[in-house]
Every structure is written in C-alpha cells, then in structure tokens.
Image: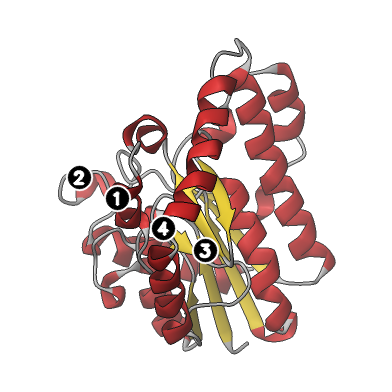
Amino acid sequence: MKNLYINGCSFSAGNNLPIEETWGYKLADKLNLKLYAEATNSQSMKGICFSSTLHLLDLDPKDTLVVIGTTWHDRRHILIDDSIISLTPSDIGGITEPIKLPQKYSISRKLTSPYYNTTDNPEKIERLSGQLNKNNAAHFKAYNQKRLSIIESLKDSKYDLHRSSEYLYDIINLQNYLKVNNYRYEIVFFQKNHNLEGEIADKLRDKLDYTHISNIDVKSDYPFNKTPLFESHPSSVHCTQIAEILYNKFNNE
C-alpha cells in the first residue's frame, strides 16, 4: 500500500485547520502513506462521489486505501468548465450578484475538479480558480440558473424524501465502485444522515455495506465526549482521535 485517498466536506478537509492537523494527514502519517487530500469545504455527496471515482482512475487499487467522509444530504453542486462549485442551503438564497460569486472560488473552499487531483496538480487548480474569476459573468449565469432551479424544486412537498434517497443511492454506488475495483476503503459518517426517513431511504439503507462504515459523532461519542467542547468542526485533538480510530480499524481487518 502506497497511497491514502481522502475525499469529503469540511469535516474531512479540516475546515480552517492547517493540513498537518487534519485527520487525513495524521492517518497517512501513521500508515506511512502518500496523502491525496481531495476533501473540500461544503461538497455535496454527489460531487464527492463523482470526483472520487474519476480521481481514482489514476490510482492503482492495489496501492491505494480510500477513506470518504460523508456530508449533508441537502447540499448540491454545479459543474462549470473543469470545476465543481458546491452549493449549500445558505448559498441558494444568498448569492444574487455576479460580483459576489468569486468568494466561492478557492482551492480550500467550495472549489474542486473531478478531472485531476490537486495533490499532484496544485498549480493547475490555482489557474482554474483564476480562469473562473476571469469569466465570472458567464459562470454566474450558469450558477444562477442552477440556484433558481433548486429554489423551484424546494416547492415539492417530497423534496427532502427525494434528496434523502438520492444521498443514500450515491453512497451505495460509490461503495459498489470501490468493491468492483478492489479498493480497500472506509466510509465515515460524521452525522446521522444514514438514518434519514422515508420508505425508499429505508430500502436503500439496507443496501449499505456496514462492514466498511464508521460512525464517528464528534459531538457526543466516546472518546470525543472526553475532550474539549466541539465547535462546529472537529478540532486538531478530535482529528488525532479520528485518525487513531481509523488506524485501529484498518489494522484489525
């Protein structure tokens, strides 16, 4: 094993933590593996699954351990040029002017690419960010069309049920992809999204492979409830504990 591939949202990216303090970095260090840190703040589950499957085409399954952190089911994304720009519920109603859109474009917050990993191409993702800002008016038009379509879909009384089912479906598809291609992997649930309600969600939840799922609730679970108070995201201390939990699981498999 040579590589550790990480993808997810801010709980996996570390939010505002230095890379050396994230659980992905600490886990790679414990396992003595090269880290591919592809998690980005605010990613949707579909965006995580889409980018992960394409990134992994360039990594040999025999040499690559994969850990995917889940996100929230109501997040969405839009493909613009070579990039994925993430949309959270607050974004949907909050950005209505082109001049404000570049605030979303950075390599650590809400911008990623499914077509190349940023670990080996940091300069390319920087150029992509600049390209998106340069073509801001055209990108805002595409962004705003997506934003308005989501606002319209919110009128559907079954919106949450549909989103819950789609969220679980994406995770099942990712698990199947990883199994078929013989990757050693783990899915980490940082929230209770796999307990989402709905008849279809119930059926899909039964299809999850729980042997490769870790539930890590940093708000209340041991050993996190013995450490400093949780403040919106895992702290450096929490990341050390998350890395230890995953390290022990891989060693016991």
What amino acid is labelled 1 in the image?
Ile
Q: List x then y, in percent, for residue 135.
A: 45, 63
Name the mark on residue 7: 3
Q: Earlier in the sequence, mark 2 or mark 1?
A: 1
| 171 left or right of 67 in image | right
Q: Alpha carbon of mark 2 to alpha carbon of mark 4: how far?
A: 34 Å
Q: Alpha carbon of mark 3 to alpha carbon of mark 2: how far?
A: 22 Å
Write the residue at 74% across / 64% down.
Answer: 178
- Provide the secondary structure element on which disc 2 rests: loop
Identify whether 90 is placed above or below 54: above
Q: List x then y, in percent, for residue 165.
A: 68, 30
Front label number (2 vs 1):
1
Q: Which of marks 1 and 4 is nearer the N terminus?
A: 1
Write the residue at 48% across / 54% down.
Answer: 139
Front label number (2 vs 4):
4
Q: Earlier in the sequence, mark 2 or mark 4?
A: 4
- Provide the secondary structure element on which disc 3 rests: strand
Say few, some or many: other residues with alpha carbon within 10 Å of mark 4 (under 14 / 14 to 19 / 20 or more): some
Quarter of the rendering containing residue 241: bottom left
Q: List x then y, in percent, for residue 64.
A: 64, 80
What amino acid is labelled 2 in the image?
Glu
Name the mark on residue 99: 1
What amino acid is labelled 3 in the image?
Asn
Quarter of the rendering containing residue 206: top right
- Provide the secondary structure element on which disc 4 rests: helix
Residues at circles 1 and 4 in contact by the CB criterion of under 8 Å: yes
Front label number (3 vs 4):
4
